[in-house]
Image (tube, rainbow, N blue to C red):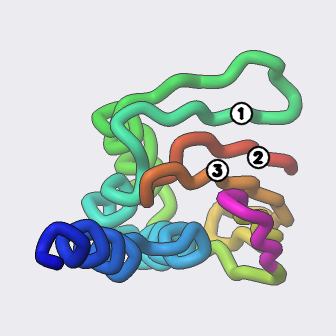
Amino acid sequence: MKSLLLPVFFFISWKVFSQNPEKIVQQQLDAYNRQDLKAFVETYSDTVEIYSFQNAKPRVLTKKDLESDYGSLFKKFPQNFAALHGRIIQGNYVIDKEYITGRGQAFSATAIYLVEKDLIRKVWFLR
């Protein structure tokens, strides 16, 4: 009987502690808007592929690269803010329609996040 309970316990524990993709992306967006660099970077995998639909090749970044890039962005634009105007969740993909302000001229953007193992692994940006 004990041998049956142990796998069930681990499965239930994994489900309880595993977060869903929407929650991970929301944590990332909240940290971005607070300009909390540490919390922002923690939502990403150790290496992340970032695609821009203007470029075919992704930028492959480490967490250190993210800290550098977004640290500079947050310092340069302390009023930077991404307002969420819509969200679609499809499996491990989260698609956000955002309106960005605080960088001079405001603009709309769409971000598509792929979440794997509770971390953002790939991002596609459309602007």
The mark nearer the N terminus, 2 or 3, is 3
Q: Nearer the viewer, mark 2 or mark 3?
A: 3
Q: Residue at x 60, y 74 (%)?
A: 22
Give neighbour class at mark 3: few <14, some 14-19, many 20+ (Cα, 10 Å). Answer: many
| x and y, in percent, of residue 94 in the image | 71, 64
| x and y, in percent, of residue 15 in the image | 40, 75
Figure check: 68 above or below 15: above
In this figure, which residue is indicated by the disc labeled 1?
51
Quarter of the figure with the N terminus: bottom left
The disc placed on residue 114 is 3
Q: Mark 1 is on which residue type?
A: Tyr
Q: Is residue 88 magenta?
A: yes
| x and y, in percent, of residue 92 in the image | 66, 59
Please report contact status of discs 3 and 1: CB closer than 8 Å, yes or no: no
Magenta residues span: 87-93
Q: Mark 3 is on which residue type?
A: Leu
Please report contact status of discs 1 and 2: CB closer than 8 Å, yes or no: yes
Q: Mark 2 is on which residue type?
A: Phe
